[in-house]
Image: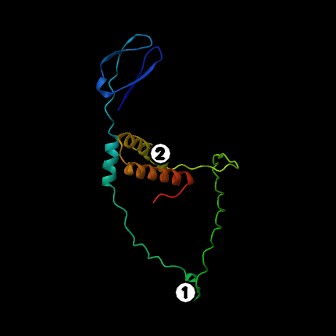
């Protein structure tokens, strides 16, 4: 239990029991103070405990069993035979309106939009590759059948991509 004491300058202190009898310095006036030794605890508590133990215990009386009054049974049969009314339902809260998200405005015009699929780039690459093979085959004096087929597939892929045909 902390030990309370005060400095002559008016400053109050509270220190632990372990510092009883030791010297300390007041931080306000720098006076050297001795922490007082607390008085030994009084035996009033011990005396009260002894008196309680020696006192005779009060006699216990039997508690009467509780029984409800007769009026409580008067309408039991009526309550058992008729069903209880349903509990009153609380009105449902009105639904909250949903927040509408703003969607970005898209560019709109009377000009039809051309949708390009990834097949268009592949078709263009096949067309260019077929053209190069046709040129090289003609220069070498050969018939460029594979190059013509490649260029034809490239042209077909470009046409389908530009017209927006679905890919399989």
Residues 67 and 167: in front is 167
**On screen, 46 above or below 14?**
below
The residue tagged 2 is 124
Quarter of the picture holding the C terminus: bottom left
What residue is rendered at 65% in x and 61% in y? 95
Residues 160 and 114: in front is 160
Residues 53 and 164: in front is 164
Q: Which comes sooner in the sequence, label 2 or label 1?
A: 1
**On screen, 54 above or below 85?**
above
**On screen, 59 above or below 46?**
below
Would you say 88 lies left or right of 44 here? Answer: right
The residue tagged 1 is 80
The answer to which image quadrant residue 57 occupies is: bottom left
Task: Where is residue 41? Give x, y as percent.
Answer: 32, 35
Task: Where is residue 122? Give x, y as percent.
Answer: 44, 47
- Name the outermost residue toward the top: 30
What residue is rendered at 33% in x and 56% in y? 55
Mark 1 residue crowding within 10 angstroms, few (<14) / some (14–19) / many (20+)? few
Exactly how many numbered labels are in the figure?
Answer: 2
What residue is rendered at 51% in x and 58% in y? 166
Q: CA distance from mark 2 to mark 1?
A: 89 Å
Q: Find numbered disc 2 in the image and state the secondary structure of the residue it sits on.
A: helix
Task: Where is residue 96? Give x, y as percent.
Answer: 65, 58
Whether label 2 touches label 1, CB < 8 Å: no
What residue is rendered at 37% in x and 67% in y? 60
- Name the outermost residue toward the front: 141
* Front label number (2 vs 1): 2
Residues 62 and 128: in front is 128
Task: Where is residue 109? Give x, y as percent.
Answer: 69, 48
């Amino acid at each position: 239990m902390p030990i309370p004491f005060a400095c002559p300058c008016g400053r109050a202190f509270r220190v632990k029991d372990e510092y009883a009898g030791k010297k300390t310095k007041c931080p306000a006036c720098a006076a050297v103070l001795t922490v007082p030794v607390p008085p030994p605890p009084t035996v009033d508590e011990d005396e009260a405990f002894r008196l309680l133990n020696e006192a005779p215990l009060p006699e216990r009386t039997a508690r009467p069993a509780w029984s409800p009054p007769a009026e409580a049974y008067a309408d039991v049969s009526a309550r058992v035979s008729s069903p209880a009314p349903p509990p009153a339902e609380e009105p449902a809260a009105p639904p909250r309106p949903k927040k509408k998200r703003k969607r970005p405005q898209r560019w709109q015009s009377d000009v039809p939009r051309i949708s390009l699929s990834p097949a268009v780039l592949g078709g263009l690459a096949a067309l260019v590759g077929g053209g190069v093979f046709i040129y090289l085959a003609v220069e070498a004096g050969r018939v460029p059948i594979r190059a013509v087929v490649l260029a034809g597939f490239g042209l077909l892929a470009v046409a389908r991509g530009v017209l927006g045909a679905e890919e399989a």
